[in-house]
Amino acid sequence: MKLYSNFFKRILDFFASVIGFVLLFPLFLVVWIILLIKNNGSAFFYQERPGKDESIFKIIKFKTMNDKKDIHGELLPAQQRLTKTGIFMRKYSLDEIPQLLNVIKGDMSLIGPRPLLIKYLPLYNETEKQRHNIRPGITGWAQVNGRNAIGWDQKFALDVWYVKNLSLLLDIKILFLTVYKVFKKDGIYTTNEDIMPDFTGTKPDN
């Protein structure tokens, strides 16, 4: 399925994302206005993330955390900054909507390994690095097989499996499972106590 992964997947991503963004634009506007009020004019979250071949791009999401800092001027832990509005948005994956713009631009795919933090790049072993052989996705195989309820090792194993088994049928399956799990609210951060801890590295490949 190299023709699909190298050519048709990008075409489907582009047109599906444009259509999806147009259909969701009224909801996009409503969430944007609510966050402008709740966050005192700060509705979007931007952060640099590694994409295909570890190239760096700037991801855009709706903001689910505040910017409260400690006495030293450092941001408080994520658990303390996740707002009630943010919890609701994550519960229904509303914070992911702006990433359709990343897909349209070509930084991301609709389906693929989630783009994680740049600081994790030196921590991956050679197998885990394969998750960057394709564009990262808004949703992926790991997200429909546990999302935040599984550990890093299992998450990366699922990501690499997806990269090696990428196909149109698999993407369709993941898309339908994603819709099902969003409505079921399965494996999503629903409180600010169960945010996944930082990745600290794994053992090198044998």
Image (cartoon, rainbow, N blue to C red):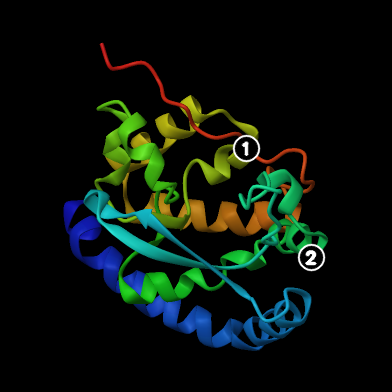
Q: Where in the figure is residue 136, as x and y percent of width and height?
A: 37, 54
The residue beneath circle 1 is 196
Relative to residue 146, is residue 102 drawn left or right? left
Quadrant where the image shows the C terminus = top left
Q: Where is residue 38? Give x, y as percent.
A: 78, 75
69 or 2, which lies in front? Answer: 69
Which mark, residue 10?
none
Q: Nearer the viewer, residue 184 or 60?
A: 60
Which structural element holds mark 2? helix
Count the labels in the image: 2
Q: Is residue 188 in view from this perspective? A: no
Tell me if 4 is positioned left or right of 19 in this view.
left
Name the amino acid type tagged 1. Met
Which residue is at 41% across, 29% downward? 157
Label 2 neighbour load within 10 Å: few <14, some 14-19, many 20+: some
Snapshot quadrant of residue 28: bottom right
Q: Quadrant of residue 18?
A: bottom left
> Which residue carries the number 2 mark?
85
Left or right: 87 in relation to 171: right
Pinpoint residue 84: horizontal percent, then vertical percent: 82, 60
Q: Are marks 2 and 1 in contact (CB under 8 Å)?
A: no
Mark 2 → mark 1, Cα distance in angstroms: 19 Å
In the image, residue 190 above or below residue 152: below
- Is 53 left or right of 146, judged from the image as shown? left
